[in-house]
Amino acid sequence: MASRGTTETSKLKQNLEEQLDRLMQQLQDLEECREELDADEYEETKKETLEQLSEFNDSLKKIMSGDMTLVDELSGMQLAIQAAISQAFKTPEVIRMFAKKQPRQLRTRLAEMDRDLMVGKLARDLYTQQKVEILTALRKLGEKLTGDDEMFLSANAGTALSQFERVSTDLGEEWQCSHWSFPLGVVENVPPGLAVSLLLDNI
């Protein structure tokens, strides 16, 4: 029975990651084609994609509610989606790595950015934006930052990031509350196996 639960959870996580990848690819394609679109078309398409992310986030909340195993597995994904919805994070690749809990890949990306900045391949403003996103993701994933990185983050964090910090703190409190407010394994009064099956059927 435990093995079946593990398999279901693994399959669920894979399907959710694939769905998130599709949405992140939509955002990335949109940014790459931005110059070919007029302003209204760009904003409308981006709004639609963010609405899809919001709907995805709502589904994620429902299946995580009260099931601490799923909270442990999917909490990073929910934080990453919230970062995208709030537009605290604007780089699809960073959001994707954050969602999949990939600190090593995030650090590799940051090292590549440092090199690109030094040789003039990356603009300073874009570097700052993406570095703030990566450092925030690393901190949320429990990674230790250097003193210099903490200072950089404090100096460059904008309003959107501050709002995301508040939201992510609220989410952490919700997860803790759900641990005590619901019997383990209850997802809105639906057995977890059935909840997983229902979601897989609709992905």
Image (tube, rainbow, N blue to C red):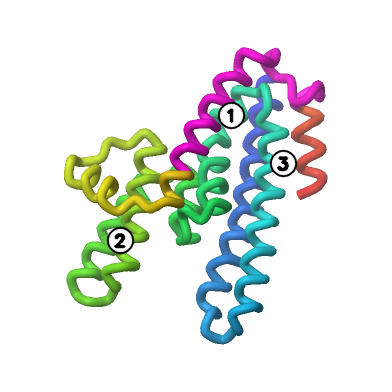
User: Which residue, given by chain and number where applicable, does mark 3 sit on?
Assistant: 59
Instruction: Report the residue marked by disc 1.
Output: 71
Q: Would you say residue 34 is visible in this rendering?
A: yes
User: Residue 161 location, x and y as percent?
Assistant: 42, 49
| Residue 17 in the image: above or below residue 69 | below
Pointer 1 or 3: first along the chain:
3
| Residue that extends furthest to the bottom in the rendered view of this protein | 36
Residue 181 or 156: which is nearer the viewer? 156
Give the amino acid type for the residue marked by disc 3 in the picture: Ser
Q: Which residue is mark 2?
A: 128
Q: Quadrant of residue 121?
A: bottom left
Task: Using residue 64 as the reference point, say whether residue 120 is left or right of it.
Answer: left
Between 188 and 99, the residue placed more toward the observer is 188
Query: How far is mark 3 from mark 2, CA to CA?
Result: 33 Å
Three-letter code for the amino acid on which mark 1 is drawn: Val
Other-residue count near label 2 (Cα within 10 Å), few / some / many at <14 / 14–19 / ≥20: some
**Residue bounds of the magenta highlight:** 164-192
